[in-house]
Image (cartoon, grey):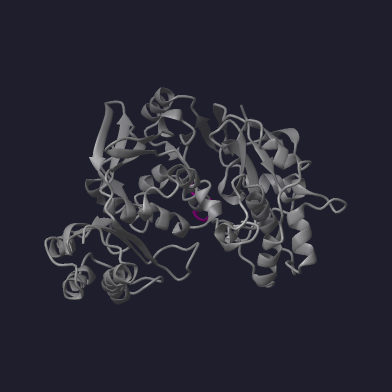
Amino acid sequence: MQTVNLTLNGQPRELPAGAYTNLLNTLRSQGLTGCKEGCAEGECGACAVLIARDDGQGGTRWDSVNACLVTLAAVDGAQVVTAEGLGSPAALHPAQRELAVRGGSQCGYCTPGFVVSMAAEYLRPDRVDGQHGAANGFDLHALSGNLCRCTGYRPIADAAYALGAPDAADPLAARRAGPAPAPRPTALNAPDGAFHRPATLAEALDLLAAHPDAKVLSGGTDWGVEVNLRHARAAVTVAVDHLPELRVFEEGADSLLLGAGHSLSELERCLDGRVPLLAGWFPQFASRLIRNSATLGGNLGTASPIGDSPPALLALDASVRLVGPGGVREVALADYFTGYRQTVRQPGELIAAVRIPLPLSPLTAFHKIAKRRFDDISSVAVGYALDVQGGVVTRARIGLGGVAATPLRAHETEAALEGQPWTEATVRAAARLLGQTGTPLSDHRASAAYRAAMLEQSLLKLWFESQSTEQEVGA
């Protein structure tokens, strides 16, 4: 097979595809030039499109994603809508109309992407008036992955806050009541490589055994950047994010099991704030456009020392479930990373899930230091989970990213806190130790001295915030 079938703006299409045929470029080749390339790495949102996905209840949810990071093969069988499919000059979609009448567009380059992200939030089924501090319940963070360089954001926000509820006659709103297209097994062999989406875990493991150098594709938000900017290629790609065995979500008496194939947005909805540390972490992970595709499996699989999930998961004492030819095994995340972008995962193994033990520590926080508040790569990231009983720290877990060749636990600082009173003097002494943790480097994001200083200040911030909010249990 060297073609892909999908529904594009309501019309069935069969399109020629290679393993690395880009969705963005394909759309533009079909005359859908509202989709733009601004950065080719998922940071500007100019290429945003809607994809129909299962809402977990038998219906459809419209997710906005970056088309620049998606290969055409990855949307085989999907339903895709571009800005052109939302409305027409004679019948504008509400998001298009509000942007136009409120002055939300000047050069227009970014406008189609804003329209798509705005439409996704407009169509969010659980949007309720008064949510997120907005009369219409519009979450402005839905636009955090869309950048505008000339209009300014006030008129764009005005347009977002002016949107009402979707009309019953809106075909995309009506579409939510029906099931989304199920991901279909795909086997594409082309001159630029092979792309496989196996139907079962057993098939995936067989493919990895037959092709040890295959690229395992989950959300693709990291690999897509490598493909676009560094022209990375693999002879064989195996997409695993839709495997049922990697999409579990189980809440037991003593642990939570989070499937590695769920998108971060899906996990955020499943958890619904039940893990406060992750609830604080989700909004700081890139943008909604990225979180609609990125997965825990992908973020841990890249083993980047500046990945945002490891610090939070290390603080939660998480473990990683691996599945391979030898069966299933679990490894503590603190023992998972062995070197720069290296882990204990063996050839042929997949990350199946992440386990978080219960009960959770009451005092938690996730601090991300970056040049931008949202949609940026961290210079330093810190996850905290502490138990404070009777004014004494009985247990401390601190996860760090951006200060060594691997994410790591701050064991020395944890030991300095445990058994000590939760006081400013204790915290200042421990903060000095935290500032000396790791082997931070100086690069274009931050100097080594700045990273060390931010570690120290982060722990002090946690203490002062715990005092102002009286976030202490058992005192």
Give residue 363's position: percent from left, percent from top.
Answer: 29, 59
Which SS does the magenta portion mostly show?
helix
Q: Quadrant of the N terminus?
A: top right
Q: How many marks?
A: 0
In the image, farthest residue toward the front? 475
Give residue 435's position: percent from left, percent from top.
Answer: 23, 71
Left or right of 368 in this view: 395: left
Front residue (pair 428, 314): 428
Which region is colored magenta?
228-232
Q: Quadrant of the C terminus?
A: bottom left
The answer to whether residue 31 shows anywhere in this view is: no
Which residue is at 65% across, 45% downward? 50
Q: Is residue 293 above or below residue 55?
A: below
Left or right of 413 in this view: 19: right
Left or right of 192 in this view: 95: right
Which residue is at 29% across, 71% downward? 467
Tell me if residue 266 is in the magenta stretch.
no
Give residue 264's position: percent from left, percent from top.
Answer: 46, 47
**Quarter holding residue 433:** bottom left
Q: Is residue 337 above or below residue 108?
A: above
Give residue 175's position: percent from left, percent from top.
Answer: 70, 36
Q: Is residue 112 above or below residue 321?
A: below
Front residue (pair 194, 285): 285
The answer to whether residue 92 shows anywhere in this view is: yes
